[in-house]
Image (spheres, rainbow, N blue to C red):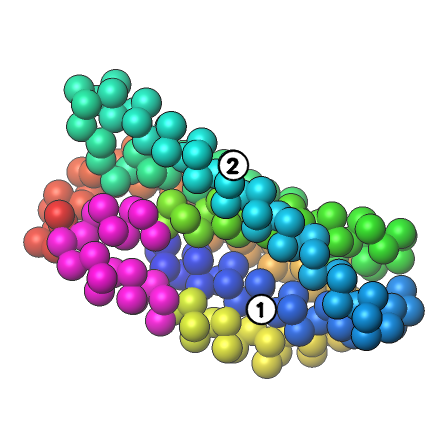
Amino acid sequence: MFGLYIAFITGIYYLMFTTFGPLFKNVYGFGPGPGGLTYLGMGIGFLIATFLGGNVGNKIYHHLAAKNGGKGIPEHRLPPLIFGSFFIPVGLFWYGWSAEARIHWIMPILGTGIFGFAFTTVFLPVQLYAADAFKFAASAISAVAVLRSILGFAFPLFGQAMYDKLGTGGGNSLLAGLSIVLGIPFPIWIYYYGERFRLRSNVDR
């Protein structure tokens, strides 16, 4: 489920890259030079999450480990994932409907920044969870990477047709709704019950 969720938002990430050009050219009149700067919103979101999320996630992990008698478990990696999963749909709604309404160009870029922040915030805990939870960590991480690559390849193939049919707001609302279904309930459930579930498996570390 974590692999499917990360693959899904990776597909959205690549879909955004393929649609930035037409959106900012046709709606906002950006040429090739200024159009390239529209990627900065997502990039800044990545950077903030990398520096802030890494430090905060590490502190949360050690805090929870201390409360557990000094023993950290993989589920202690998940609070940043739970936090970030709420901002994936926020970023998508913000980006989609601000572009649909054709308000100032900074607004959809801010939406992509929120998405970029959320993407990195959920990506790092999944990688760490896979490394901590499974006996064959490289295989678990590779399985997640394969799913990510498949959906990262597939989404741009149909994404523009989806936006042409539903509009930028409607298309992003569909993606946001799916991200809520895939990304919010499951990490919370795993945080509370994941250890019990893992210990039944023969591939648990």
Coordinates of residue 199 in the picture (x, y in percent): 13, 43
Q: Residue at x 86, y 73 (%)?
A: 31
- Determine whether label 1 and label 2 are within 8 Å by CB: no
Q: Is residue 69 above or below residue 96?
A: above
| Front residue (pair 9, 41) | 41
Amino acid type indicated by mark 2: Leu
Q: Residue at x 75, y 67 (%)?
A: 36
Q: Is residue 190 above or below residue 31?
A: above
Coordinates of residue 151 in the picture (x, y in percent): 47, 71
List the residue tagged with mark 2.
52
Q: Residue at x 87, y 68 (%)?
A: 30
Q: Which residues are magenta?
A: 127-146
* Mark 1 → mark 2, Cα distance in angstroms: 24 Å
| Front residue (pair 121, 1) | 121
Q: Quadrant of residue 48?
A: top right
List the residue tagged with mark 1.
14
| Front residue (pair 170, 100) | 100
Q: Nearer the viewer, mark 1 or mark 2?
A: 2
First reached walking from the N terminus: tag 1 or tag 2: 1
Q: Residue furthest left?
A: 202
Coordinates of residue 197 in the picture (x, y in percent): 19, 43
Crowdedness near tag 1: few (<14), some (14–19) or many (≥20) residues, C-alpha within 10 Å:
some
Taking the image as drawn, is residue 35 in sight? yes
Taking the image as drawn, is residue 89 in sight? no
Where disc 1 sits, the SS reads helix
Q: Quadrant of residue 82?
A: top left
Where disc 2 sits, the SS reads helix
Coordinates of residue 141 in the picture (x, y in percent): 29, 61
Q: Any mark on residue 72, and which?
A: none
